Amino acid sequence: MIIDQGAGGALLLTSRWGQDRLDQPSPAVREVLRRMELGPVLLANALSSPEDQCRTALPTLDRLSHLVVRTLGVDDLKGPLLSVFPLSSGAPFVRIRPTGDCRVRLPRHVALTVPDSGAGCVLESDDSPHRVVLHRQEAAWVAMTLAWPTTLTAVSAALPLPRQVTEDIVGYLAGAGLATLVDEHGMTGGAPRPA
């Protein structure tokens, strides 16, 4: 994404899907977008108040969802766990929080590949508008447990990860369309609902 100053205080965001125009974006939105050009941004660090985040930045970022790479990390200085990349201009992302007893799995036709660079793994499907790069082994562990129907409680018990990390990874995969609900007969449904 390339950000240019337009006439009358507008911002022009150019991507492979064309151009998006923001007329008179707030200073908070301008700051978030400026930082996003440089790399991953924690909104709490980029905005001066929670009100800026809720009132102005989040609605604008939702509108620009097809331009935003969402990255999940933990405070351990080892780098991000995973990143969700939009693959089309119609790629909405809603982070989902499945419950502990909710049965989930990877949907059919999801491919897990290792790029030639050897940097992490990639999860993708022709049915998903997103590609997920699993940067660290912890994220790959969680994704691999979803090859069969399971619950978050079972995944958390099986892996040496804090429960919240496991839930966040599954939530990002579900938001990207790469984890689905499973009924008691093993049939997949839609993605879990947003919290």
Image (cartoon, helix red, strand yellow):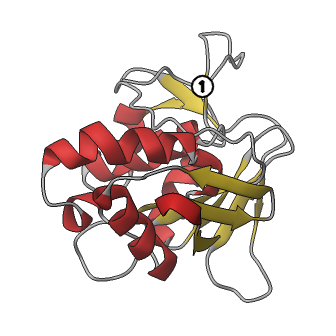
Q: Is residue 125 visible?
A: yes
Where is residue 35 shown, x and y percent of the image?
39, 74
**Residue 117 in which image quadrant:** bottom right
123, above or below 176, in the image: below
Q: Residue furthest left?
A: 49
Which residue is depicted at the point 25% across and 53% down?
162
Q: Nearer the viewer, residue 30 or 83?
A: 30
Q: Viewed as shown, does residue 164 lie left or right of 68? A: left
Task: Read off the residue under disc 1.
Answer: 191
Q: Nearer the viewer, residue 140 or 72?
A: 72
46, above or below 161, in the image: below
Q: Viewed as shown, does residue 139 lie left or right of 154? A: right
Where is residue 76 shown, x and y percent of the image?
24, 76
Figure label count: 1
**Residue 74 in which image quadrant:** bottom left
Q: Quadrant of the C terminus?
A: top left
Q: Secondary structure at mark 1?
A: loop
Where is residue 39 shown, x and y percent of the image?
46, 78
